Image (cartoon, rainbow, N blue to C red):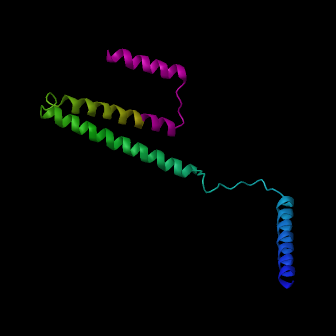
Amino acid sequence: MINTAHAMHVVQMEESSTTKHLSVAMTTEKDDTTQPTHGSSVLSREAVLYIQCAVIFIGVVGTAGNALILYAMVASKQHKKHVLIVNQNVMDLFTSVFLVISYVLKMCNVYLSDTLSRLLQVKLCTTST
């Protein structure tokens, strides 16, 4: 009898504890400040600036490295033997140059309009043929 009474008392305490907790949760006002959760990340403007500067640095180093390799291959007259390496270096060089240009323009808040970007694409395509 004592065990049954004790068990009933524990169940009643748990139920009252749960209802108190639920009533507090239901009546608590929601504040408008939102905190980022652990799963989502919000980058500050300084972090974005550092990332953009790092990308520009990588692009400059890539441009210099690929230009140096191309110069060395042409100066040593090895460019005719290793056509695949030369082509890969040329593509990497142009990619690095365009990476630097696009991120510098992005950092300076210069956005090309659709018409201007299409005009540049047409000019680049017609001058290379």
Quarter of the N terminus within the rendering = bottom right
Instruction: Identify the residue at horizontal 68%, vertical 56% (top origin).
Output: 35
Q: Is the residue 7 above or below the residue 69 in the image?
A: below
Looking at the image, the residue that sits furthest to the bottom is: 2
Give the camera-side residue of 85 and 99: 85
Q: How many marks?
A: 0
Q: Dividing the image into 4 quarters, which one contains the C terminus?
A: top left
- Decide whether residue 103 is among the magenta residues: yes
Specify the quadrant of the image occupied by residue 93. Answer: top left
Q: Determine which quarter of the picture holds residue 84.
A: top left
Farthest residue toward the front? Answer: 1
| Horizontal relation, residue 114 to residue 24: left or right | left
The residue positioned 17% from the left and 34% from the top of the image is 73
67 magenta-colored: no
**Left or right for 106, reference 64:** right
Q: Is residue 40 above or below residue 67?
A: below
- From this view, report whether residue 50 is shown above or below residue 60: below
Residue 46 x/y as whole percent:
54, 51
Residue 87 x %, y %: 25, 29
Residue 67 at what x, y percent from top left? Answer: 26, 36
Q: Position of residue 105 (x, y in %)?
A: 48, 35
Residue found 48% across the figure and 19% down from its top: 118
Q: Which residues are magenta?
A: 101-129
- Which residue sits at x=48%, y=50%? 50
User: Does residue 51 appear left or right of residue 10 in this picture?
Assistant: left
- Left/right placement of residue 129 relative to residue 52 reads left
Give above or below for 78 relative to 44.
Answer: above
Chief secondary structure of the magenta portion: helix
